[in-house]
Structures are given as C-alpha cells and as structure tokens.
C-alpha cells in the first residue's frame, strides 16, 4: 500500500476507534494477529480484543477523550504519530477516583501497517504527566 494509505488507516484508528469509540472498525483495520505494546497496557502485548477492552475502560474514565494527531510521518510499512490527548476525568482511572479535572498530555506511537491493516503498535503515553494532573502537584 502507498504511504498515504497507511497514514489514513492510522488516522481512522485514532479518530474513529479511540476518539469516537467506534470499536467495531478495529476488526476491519487491525489484523487478527494485531499486537499492542503500550504504557497503558503494561509489560505484555495485548491483542485486538484486549485493545477494545482497554479503550472501553479508558472511555469510562475519560468519556470525552479526544486524540489530536499533531504530526504523522511514514516510511515503508511504519507510521509514526505525535499526538495530544485531552479528556475529563469522570470515572476511576488506575484506582484514582473521578476528580472532574480536565487533563491534557502527549503521546507518541509507531504502527506497522501491512496490506491495509495494523499488525503491530507501540504506544508511549506521558503517563507521569497524566497522573500528576489527576493527583495534583506534589509538595
């Protein structure tokens, strides 16, 4: 596939599935062998069903979560994106009860797209910044 097509698949992943909760499209745009390695998912890779559960859980914690792709670049079958994420903490997240705080934090990701489907995904969320915003400054 063309590089622009690969970028379009990645945009759908973040815009439709993650920001809008349209998890059904993950079966279309993620390979059955899809694996995610992420700050949020822990040390072990999770599969396509695992990412659906992760997104559902995250949207309970941040129901208005939105991801904005700031930069997206691609070479071969790899697509990299730098993003800003925002949301209101309305549900328990990592044992932190809802605070009602609006949070903004960055993330970066690499995805491998083969034949129009995401097969591998590595995501790095600025979890320290997110947790600090939820817990308040230490002092």
Image: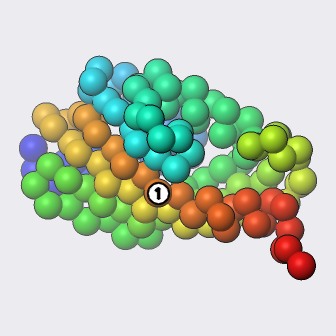
* Point 27% across, 24% down: residue: 33
Is 18 rendered above or below residue 131? above
On the rendered structure, is 125 left or right of 1? Answer: right
The quadrant where residue 26 appears: top left
Q: Can residue 95 be seen at all in this image of the molecule? A: yes
Q: Position of residue 71 (x, y in %)?
A: 37, 70
* Point 43% across, 52% down: residue: 123
Is 41 rendered above or below residue 88? above
Which residue occupies the foreground of this view, 44 or 67? 44
Give the colouring mode of the picture: rainbow
The quadrant where residue 87 appears: bottom right
Which residue occupies the foreground of this view, 132 or 107? 132
Q: Position of residue 51 (x, y in %)?
A: 49, 31
Which residue occupies the foreground of this view, 5 or 40? 40
On the rendered structure, is 121 left or right of 6? Answer: right
Q: Position of residue 77 (x, y in %)?
A: 14, 49
């Amino acid at each position: 596939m063309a590089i622009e097509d690969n970028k379009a698949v990645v945009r759908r992943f973040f815009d439709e599935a993650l920001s809008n909760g349209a998890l059904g499209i993950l079966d279309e745009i993620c390979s059955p062998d899809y694996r995610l390695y992420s700050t949020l998912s822990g040390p072990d890779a999770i599969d396509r069903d695992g990412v659906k559960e992760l997104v559902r859980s995250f949207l309970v914690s941040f129901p208005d979560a939105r991801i904005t792709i700031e930069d997206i670049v691609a070479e071969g079958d790899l697509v990299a994106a730098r993003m800003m994420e925002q949301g209101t903490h309305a549900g328990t997240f990592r044992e932190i009860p809802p605070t009602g705080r609006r949070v903004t934090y960055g993330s970066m990701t690499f995805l491998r797209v083969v034949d129009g489907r995401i097969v591998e995904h590595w995501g790095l969320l600025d979890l320290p910044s997110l947790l600090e915003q939820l817990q308040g400054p230490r002092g």
